[in-house]
Image: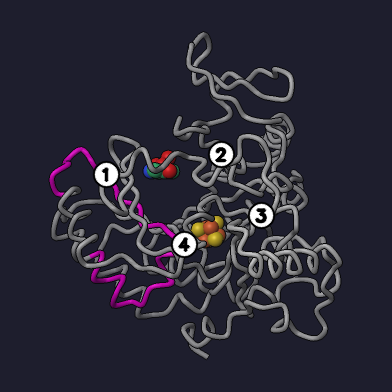
Amino acid sequence: MNWEEQLRRNIRRLEDLPKEFVVSKEELEFFRRIKNMETSRSGVSYMPFSVTEYFLSLSDYTDPNCPIRRQFMPDPRELEESPMESDDPLYEERYRVSPRLIHRYRNRVLLLVTNFCPLNCRYCFRRYYKEMEPDVISKKELELASRYIGEHREVKEVLLSGGDPLSLSDSKLESIITRLRESRDEIVIRIGSRVLSVLPDRITDSLIEVFKRHKPIWFVAHFNHPKELSPRVLDKVELLVDSGIPILNQSVLLRGINDDPQVLAELFEILVRNRVKPYYIFQCDLARGTSHFRVPIERGLTIMERLREVLSGVGMPDYALDLPGGGGKVSLFAVDIERRGDNYIIKKREGSREEYVYPV
Ligand SMILES: *Cc1c(COP(=O)(O)O)cnc(C)c1O
Ligand code: SF4
């Protein structure tokens, strides 16, 4: 089955799960509550359930705590909002320079080419974006973004994100890249995608040809747990790297999924052996309904210390946080962190007056 057919067979309703899949009481509770929400039109929104058959097949059908399963099975705690959570935790709206273009850092921009993903990760920080109908960048929006990039020569890199850019067809993707290259033929293109982990068959020979035609393109993957690195996935990783496409990995530190130095060490070691550089591990952002996934920063730092002892520099990612309220990305190894009551106070530099508050 090709990847497009696989996507059409995505599991989006409780009834579509295999019979052998034992749904837990909590998971059922989520579905019960959203059903009531729809009928009462209470206006509260939530991220729809959607998982590929492939990723589902990696999960344990009888263990609700399975680290694969927890990434796609909803939890009723998602319908609760904790203090400081929001729909736009990174304040991206403030840095939007055209409908889908976010210019937060001087030398790089983020282009949101679609809001669709093959799998809805329950901890997604752009969940507000995913509650809308699937929507893909229009010709006019691409034109506006490309013109902006053409006029802003300080921008050296454009990140395609969303949603998952590789949920688009090869031809749509190539038309986007071609238009960007018309504006700036030397610009570095970075594609952030989770398909390697959730829909590996998306990596086709023809996709690789697109990448090769439009060098330089960097691939940024998203693996959270060693169980995601199946032989089928590693074959695709090899195909990409052998074709000259460099791969970086971004993970999210997730409670009960990968907040364990042994699990992360295994993940990063396998990645390095397969020529993927662990780039970032992110502190979970303050998106609405994600508090049950968050690991306290202090514990995160302890985990990273343990990792430093066992990993090489190549295997060690940066532990980063996108500061709430649009403060930008910082390395948690390089900021000043102080505990004040139920919060951390984060300063970009010691002695700085600018303070960012993050819950414990
Ligand atoms: C993360 C991010 C980038 C890329 O930052 P790097 O540190 O280069 O990976 C660019 N723009 C925005 C808005 C981002 O959130
Ligand atoms: S792949 Fe990324 S954008 Fe898509 S649902 Fe997962 S975290 Fe969100």
Disc 2 packing (10 Å; few <14; some 14–19; many ≥20): few
- The answer to which of marks 2 and 3 sits earlier in the sequence is 3
Q: Which residues are magenta?
A: 150-177
Label 1 Cα crowd, 10 Å radius (few <14 / some 14-19 / many 20+): some
The residue located at (69%, 54%) in the rendering is 79
- As displayed, is residue 360 above or below residue 140? above
Front-most of residues 189 and 329: 329
Relative to 226, is 209 on the left or the right? left
**In the image, is residue 164 above or below residue 171?**
above
Question: In what element is the residue under mark 1?
Answer: strand
Amino acid type of the residue that numbered disc 3 sits on in the rendered structure = Leu
Name the mark nearer the viewer: 4 or 3. 4
Q: Which residue is mark 3?
A: 267
Q: Nearer the viewer, mark 2 or mark 3?
A: 3
Q: CB under 8 Å between callouts 2 and 1? A: no
**Of the numbered discs in the image, which one, if any, rests on residue 313?**
2
C-alpha gap between disc 1 and disc 3: 37 Å
**Residue identifier under label 1:** 97
- Give neighbour class at mark 4: few <14, some 14-19, many 20+ (Cα, 10 Å): many
* Label 4 sits on residue: 193
**Tag 2: amino acid:** Gly
